[in-house]
Amino acid sequence: MKEDIIAANISGLRSDIQSLAKQIAAWSRSFAQQATPAPQTQIDEKQLAAAIADLIHTDIKSRLQNDKEFVNTVVSAYDRVAKQYSEDINTTHNCLKQNNSYLQLTEKRYKELAATVAAVKRHADPPSIPQTMEAIPRFLFITYPWYWVRRIYHSSHFRQYLLLCMSFILMLSVFMTMLVAYDNVRMRRVGNASYYNSNR
């Protein structure tokens, strides 16, 4: 990229130098025609060539400096744009990755919820009433009680009630164990005291 810009500017500089040389030649011819043939007004070709060389050198140096600054400006702007583009790509990639994880989690939860709803619906559907007399005993003693067992098992309220009862039984058993241990210690102390009193 830098080489292309410098080559284009050098080609433009060459054309400017050629036009400058033509202008200087035309100016020198017009000056020679207007000048008198006196020796003190004669133009020194060496000084003219040196002046032209200095002018061309100064012009080339200024143009190269301007080209260098322009190239640096363009390259720095390109670097900033490329860096911003890379940051935007990374941000977009992270957002897509996060959205993909959210979608996977949502899909997983939806599948779990659908499975739970299907299981609850399957266990909550009441059995159909039999139409024949032979199926009534099986319905009354097996199908219908088993339906209520499954419904109670899958009921969240029953599970909470069962957990509450189990917690109460656990606390009651701990309390009774502590009470029995305390009563045993007390009875042992009373027995030891009565034994000592009887031996006196």
Image (cartoon, grey):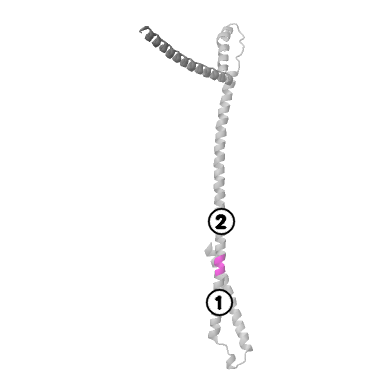
- The amino acid beneath tag 1 is Ile
Where is residue 99, by image quadrant? top right
Label 2's element? helix
Label number found at residue 180: none
Whether residue 185 is in magenta: the answer is no
- Residue 10 visible, this angle: no
Judge by depth and name the residue closer to the eye, 58 or 194.
194
Q: Residue furthest top?
A: 133
Q: Secondary structure at mark 1?
A: helix
Residue 14 percent across, percent down from the top left: 56, 73
| Residue at which label 2 appears | 80
Q: Residue 131 placed where, x, y %?
A: 62, 9
From where the camera sits, is residue 23 visible?
yes
Q: How many marks?
A: 2
Is mark 2 in CB contact (under 8 Å) with mark 1? Answer: no
Q: Nearer the viewer, mark 2 or mark 1?
A: 2
For this rendering, which residue is in front, 159 or 188?
188
Q: Which mark is residue 56?
A: 1
Q: Position of residue 149 (x, y in %)?
A: 55, 15
Percent across and percent down for residue 164 are 55, 19
Q: Main secondary structure of the magenta part?
A: helix
Q: Is residue 140 rendered to the left or right of residue 190?
A: right
On screen, residue 105 above or below 84: above
What is the C-alpha distance between the residues marked 2 and 1?
Answer: 36 Å
Which quadrant of the structure image shows residue 195?
top left
> Residue visible at 61% across and 85% down?
29
Q: Quadrant of residue 127?
A: top right
Most extreme residue toward the front, as rendered? 200
Q: Residue at x 54, y 76 (%)?
A: 57
- Region of the chain picked out in magenta, as a range: 65-69
Residue name at image x 55 percent, y 10 percent: 142
